[in-house]
Amino acid sequence: MALFQKTVLVKYTNQINKELLSEKWELYKAHFHNPQIQENIYNSKEEQYQEGFLRDLFVNILGYTLNPADNFNLTTEYKNIKDSKKADGAIIINQKVRAIIELKGTNTTDLSKIEAQAFGYKNNQPDCTYVITSNFEKLRFYIDNAVDFLEFNLFNLSENDFKNLFLCLAFQNISQDIPKKIKQESVSQEEAITKKLYKDYSAFKQTLFVSLCQLNPDIDQLILFKKSQKLLDRFLFLFFAEDSYLLPSNSVRTILNQWDKLKELDAYIPLYERFKQFFGYLNNGNKEKEIFAYNGGLFKPDEILDQLQIDDNLLYQNTKKLSEYDFNSEIDVNILGHIFENSLNELDEIQAQIQGQTIDKAQTKRKKDGVFYTPKYITKYIVENTIGKLCDQKKQEIQLNDEDFAKSKQKKTKEQLLTKLKTYREWLLQLTIIDPACGSGAFLNEALNFLIAEHQYLDELEGKLFGASITFQNVENSILENNLFGVDLNEESVEIAKLSLWLRTAQRGRKLNDLSANIKCGNSLISDPEVAGEKAFDWQKAFPKVFEKGGFDVVIGNPPYGAKLDKETQNYLTKKYIQGGGETVISFTKLAYDFLLKEGGEFGFIIPKSFSFASNYKAIREFILNDIYKIIDCKKVWKEVLLEQIIFFFSKGKNTESFISGILKDKDFIELGNISKETFNSFGFFLNGVTSQELEIGNKINKCDFYIKDIATNSRGGIFQKYISDREGNLKVLGGAEIQREGIVGIKGLIDETIIKNDEKSFIKENSILVQNIVAHIENPIEHIKITACFPEDRNFAIVDTINQITFNENYNAKTFWLIFNSKLINWYTYRFILAKAIRTIHFDNSITNRIPIPKNFNQQPFVEKADKMLSLHKELREVSDKFSRMVVRKFELGDNLPKKLQTWYELSFKEFVKELGKLKIKLSLSQEAEWEDYFLQEQKKAQQIATQITQTDKEIDQMVYKLYNLTEEEIKIVES
């Protein structure tokens, strides 16, 4: 969405004090609209006017107090917390930085260039919400992240735009967090509108399809469904066009009213005939009715669609309801994107039903929520790091610099500068960008936005040369015709992608582009008709002009993954592309590298994180290793999708020795540093989301070159759960839940030993530790994992397969590794350098333990002694705790099991203890309470003294493990932070 919903913005601007606003507007015009002052600003260097700018705008107009005045809330040059870098200014509310300000001179034309720098400062201020950048002529305002912003041209600001500027930046509003509230309300309203519109749109689609099937029984149902989708596309364009002044206002309502009058005049014709007539106007134009021939293919005659019988009432009620939405102020392309994506997902379901196929209900449910529509902050980042990267390289190549166009620096002739602009524009117009699985067009729309902005940047530079506003004509048409390409397996996806681009670029009185040559339907991965049938896709034939020039410049997208493919398709993909090609993500990546990208071309995909570490992706990782230059760990982009995602980029044929590692946090992309590709060989996967300091520690630990696999075996317990009983059996059974770091806690049940006597995995061996098979992932206070291992002093148990048994050879004492596995360092290392910081179900099997490094031939005796001490302390604590628990159970007749909170009674206050008893409907008299308090506090003191010793010993063990791996004090701080 835009930064604010228009209706929400208007609501808040109407609340501003009109007299104050009028007074400030006059002051603003007197300064920033003064031609001489503007000229002086143009001629000023960045440093000369920085403080003056803050005073002229923020103090005089927006109500701030500048340092060093008393109680100042605005200051120049504010230093980062973590380093010596400084922002040009900061807004401080209650001693906390709420906004940072980054300023450049007017010779910086494109404010996007300083976006990363400004957000670098923001990320150093934990309470900072707002980012303001300016070149004294233009000003950008961001909230929380760089996805959306408002931009104001200060030198020609209208009174209405000044209202918005004042609303966003005035001290009284920033201090009350009004802009953040507007954004939150906008997000809530957009979500509500999206749900409501989708509900109404979906109801129309479903009832329309049912009605079409009833009224047109001779036409195949699948054809009817596809035609219903095309009809809905036409209506959506119509709703959008009438609210965006491409058509006369209330065109739909006029059609409905005229139809009502025809009925009254006894001149009835079907309502669909009236709409078809209007569609004809949109295709061919009608001067009398002021309707332009937008054409583009959407409204071309369609023999089947034009002959359908459609229920009048159904058409009347639904078009009336949908036309009541404001498609100009309430609905944007992103909302429609979610609607379109949902529509495609429903199409998959209905097609399957028509064809008698079974449906994966779980997947369908996820898709109904629109989770595969790629959000703007993802598409924007990928576009900026692929198309944007090429654009920056081209500007450097031809030495196109903003500074050369500043009035004070025009040393070169206008002809030379104009030649550079022309060269860059010509290059820009021949850039080719493909999304090979384009869906409803999210990436293509973002690429369109980026390229439009680049042309506007060129217009601005040209305007500086000639002192007048200059606009390259029909830029959107040129981009659609020359730059953007898409392919999708789904015919309806292709039509919706076209529609979304038309909605984004449509202008009054200008024909829509015919996109059929650029956006095509087919199976991107398969060119053989014997495998893919009529969907087989020949890239060379589809886009001959592109491949005459060596291929596409950019490949971007969010390719499908996890699809269930038949054996023939899997074999075809593996043979054509690479080992594992049956996973479509792998095939799409290899397709891009081998067939689509020209040499030096840029690639950016968002894909499952398992691509970076899972064994089935090993071959493709090795193939693209040399060319990868950036990996961003996004964690879970879609809440409803279980898999985590990464974004990865490569430049074809441009070998690099390292890649940039980064993370996505609150829609901000944070680059953590460079990681040498040698780590791929060391760790066996693409590390990501680790800092350079963490990597140094990881490398130090991994240099042991000796692993758990060299000294132990790892096997799961037995699979005999169906034989476990609550009451019958002569052998106690343990499951993962009974394994705790302090020891074995409780039992899973009982079993007759004879049932499992021949299954050695079911029994505890000598010199072993037991580990919960599923490793816990914990998000608070920071993300980490918890390996839970215990040393079984009593081996007289059976164990099931939710437990891993690590059995050590005779030279290594299991007690030592009980401590090491539970240590902070090994958990920290495993999370980052074995598990790739993944949030998923993690099984503590050989794939993990084989890669845990262990120093050779170290002295184990100190660890064994600490282990014995810990075992003794835990035993003492259990004795004290169990004694008190037995007293509680006995006195209050509670049966065998205490509630969980009462099992750790010594961690409660006496008041909390009484409250827990109350939950069991146990009420103490005053005398009982006094007696119990004395006893409780006496026993609690004993237990807490032991617990304190356990905590202290645990810290000592952590220090011993740090020393074992030779960590320095600084390195220990990094691990523990």
Image: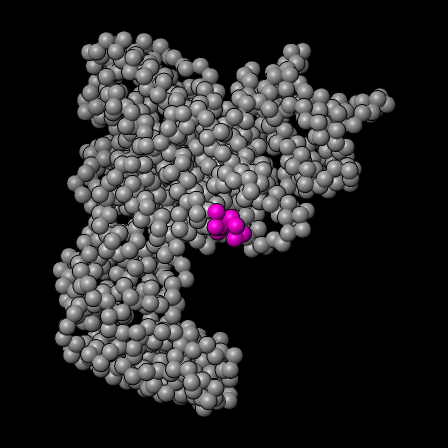
Q: Is residue 571 magenta?
A: yes
Q: Residue at x 29, y 83 (%)?
A: 766
Q: Nearer the viewer, residue 24 or 844?
A: 844
* Quarter assignment of residue 944: bottom left
The stretch in magenta equals 561-572
Q: Is residue 686 magenta?
A: no
Camera sees residue 62: no
Q: Nearer the viewer, residue 506 or 218?
A: 218
Tag count in the figure? 0
Above or below, 917 relative to 844:
below
Q: Residue at x 67, y 34 (%)?
A: 227
Q: Position of residue 250 (x, y in %)?
A: 65, 23
Q: Position of residue 369 (x, y in %)?
A: 54, 47
Q: Nearer the viewer, residue 222 or 473?
A: 222
Q: Residue at x 36, y 56 (%)?
A: 615
Camera sees residue 396: yes
Above or below, 771 relative to 569:
below
